[in-house]
Image (spheres, rainbow, N blue to C red):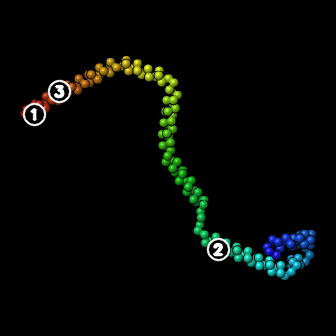
Amino acid sequence: MDTLWEEVEELDENPDSKQQPDHHRQGSFSSNIRSGRQLDSIGKRGKELTMELAKLTKKLAEMPEIDYDKNKIKFVHMFTERALESNEHIQMIVNRLKVIEKIHEDSPDINATIDKISAQSKANMPQTLAKEEAAITGVKKQIGENLRELQKLMEK
């Protein structure tokens, strides 16, 4: 027999083993085995499997601890922190997009808005020029007074 499974299948093919459950069968397990050679083969394969299991257990024990869940948690935490840090930037971007959207919605009326602003500017222009002219005249007078005081101080 090459493998343990072939040996077990051969035992299952025995008509006596299929008729009754294990605890009702007549005779012992060894009576179903045709030769001592099969028993030795099964024992040898069992020892090989036990040794292989021991090797795998040893390798598992020697492996460094790999903590996948911990690494996943760290990864998610890092991205959550980045998202929270960028929240302010996202809000600024959203606000800018809202302004752009409003400009886009108002764009069909932009000519009317420009004309309105232009008309208001023309209406306010004489008043604005008068205020600026008064401010410039006031600054000129102040500069003239400051120059006279400087001359007086320099003459003394």
Q: State which quadrant residue 28 falls in.
A: bottom right
Q: Amino acid at mark 3?
A: Gly
The amino acid type of the residue labelled 1 equals Met
Q: Quadrant of the N terminus?
A: bottom right
* Residue matched to label 3: 144
Q: Is residue 52 left or right of residue 104?
A: right
Disc marking residue 58: 2
Say which label, 3 or 2, has the lower sequence index. 2
Identify the residue at image location x=60%, y=59%. 69
Q: Is residue 116 above or below residue 152?
A: above
> Residue 124: x percent and y percent?
36, 19
Q: Quadrant of residue 144?
A: top left
Residue 154: mark: 1
Mark 3 or mark 1: whose residue is earlier in sequence: 3
Q: Is residue 12 above or below residue 35?
A: above
Q: Element under label 2?
A: helix
Vertical order, 1 against 75 (above or below): below
Circle 3 crowding by C-alpha within 10 Å: few under 14, some 14–19, many from 20: few
Sequence-wise, the earlier of marks 1 and 2 is 2
Residue 65: image location, x then y, percent: 59, 67
Residue 141 higher or lower than 10, as above or below: above
